[in-house]
Image (cartoon, rainbow, N blue to C red):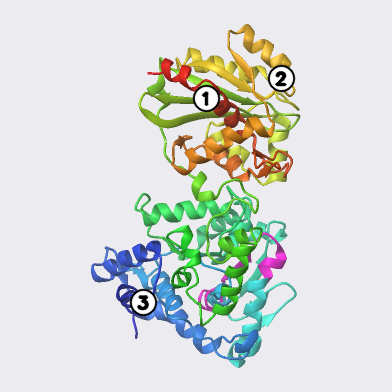
Amino acid sequence: MVNYIFEYWAKIKSGEIIVGQKIKKLYEKIVGELENPKHPYIFDIEKASKPIIFIEKFCRHSKGRWAGKPIHLELWQKAMIQIVYGFINSETGLRRVREWFVLVGRKNGKSTLASGIGLYEMLTEKGSQVVCAATTLKQAKIVFHEAWNMVKQSPDLSKHIRKRKDDLYFDASLSVYEPICNKSSTQDGLNAQLGIVDECHAIKDRNLYDVIKESQSTRDQPLMLTITTAGFIRESLYDSLYDYACNVLDGVIADDTFIPFLYELDDRDEWLNQDCWIKTNPGLGSIKQKTTLESYVERAKNEESFKPTVLTKEFNLKATNSNAWLPYEVLQNTSTFDINMFRGSYCVGGVDLSSTGDLTCATIICMKKNDPVKYVLQHYWIPANMALKKEKEDGIPYTAFMKQGVLSLSGYNKINYSDVTDWFDLVVKELKIIPYKIGYDEWNSSYWVQEMQQKGFDTVAVRQGYKSVSPAMKEMEADFRDKLINYNNNKLLFWCLTNTTAIFDAAGNIKFDKSSNKKKRIDGTASLYCGYRILLDHHQQFLNLIK
């Protein structure tokens, strides 16, 4: 039998096949394990090849120019399958890999591959339950219907698998294959052998994913297969799995049961280089039409509103939204710091007070002598009766943010602004950091300003018009691009930043748009802006105070 892993790796090393650095890193590691096995795991070429043989022998295409023709898997697909199925425990014979994450550009055969794997798992495990999960039942049925089409076109499969109202059924082993979504009542009785999660970038919370994964606890060798492109929703299931995948590849997390195949560009500008397109589209020219992608790229060059879709869906570049102020990779900064290193020094502050039901955010910005980095500490508040409601409505994990310590409950149906005052009091009394001046939006703030002034804080109203906002936003943009804003990996601030859209006046001045989407909060950005405005207006005085 052929070892497709070695074959694929040889073509990557020779330059015949171009892949990104994350794919190279993965295959370098896997090939190293093939040559020097890690006890107790060995590579079984027969088990590695069985799903490939099954798909190519029994499964057929159902759409387009290949309709009715046998599926011939591509080298990159065969190598993936062998990695997932080939490494077994030498003592138990059970498969090592329990989670298979595939990030690849759209129209590269994801659904076809997942459908075939689903049928294989349905037929090879006794009492198997294969579930296709997605954010909607319609999306979940894409993989399911493709599997049913494969069954209908195969005399062998159709003899043994029958279609019932909501699932496929294999009588010989009492196995089922069914689509589910967040609203499916079938979640309650899950005992999944294989969970196929389709387009996880669209799934706002991870409840469905976790329900499937937890249902696998009684299985000897369960598998989760997640297939996706990048997406626009931040702090979603996709972000969580992608971050985990990167940590596994980088060795930060040791988890050999999780195998990520991240087909993506190494540099944002590579989307303009045709030689690099294959990095995110390994089926380009065979599964996916190159001429179609060429037309998309040309249109994206000339139509700014279409560009984010192309970058995200065709090239897996993480996005903010279609009218984003700054791109994802500019805003992302996972650096952290110890706030205690500023004890005995000064900071500037910024506050964005909320209306009923919204987030309120307070910010301090610290600096050190001869260090251009702005060190940002933020805290948020949300009304107690709105937290769970907003979590469900917005699809944002407010509960997780509370556990991380960056968000607190305040008041019942509206924020108690005294909590903000108390936070600045804590900054002074416990952290021993003195706010030089604190900027705020004048809207709905008169009572809070009086309270702050009574406490001895110097508060300054910050204008929100184009001419005031534009210089600070441009300064913030330059600092974000140079990674000079360290926000201590605050995920809630990052979410606010990726939600931020920009609007312009006739003179080209810029400001953030608070009215664009009420569900996509930008309170953290607004609070940061207020602090930056103070920093710009009193820069030299502040530098003279800090250590």
Q: What stretch is highlighted in magenta?
A: 120-141
- The foreground one among 416 and 132 is 416
- The foreground one among 70 and 469 is 469
Image spot of residue 390 (x, y percent): 71, 40
Q: Which mark is residue 445?
A: 2
**Residue 129 among those drawn in magenta:** yes
Residue 5 occupies quadrant? bottom left
Residue 419 occupies quadrant? top right
Q: In this view, does 105 lie to the left or right of 256?
A: right
Precedes in sequence: disc 1 or disc 3:
3
What amino acid is found at the position of numbered circle 1 in the picture? Leu
Image spot of residue 299 (x, y percent): 63, 68
Mark 2 or 3: the one toward you:
2
Q: How far apart are marks 1 and 2 (CA)?
A: 21 Å
Mark 1 or 2: the one toward you:
1
Question: Which residue lies under the disc numbered 3?
Answer: 8
Question: Which residue lies under the disc numbered 1?
Answer: 535
Image spot of residue 76 (x, y percent): 43, 76
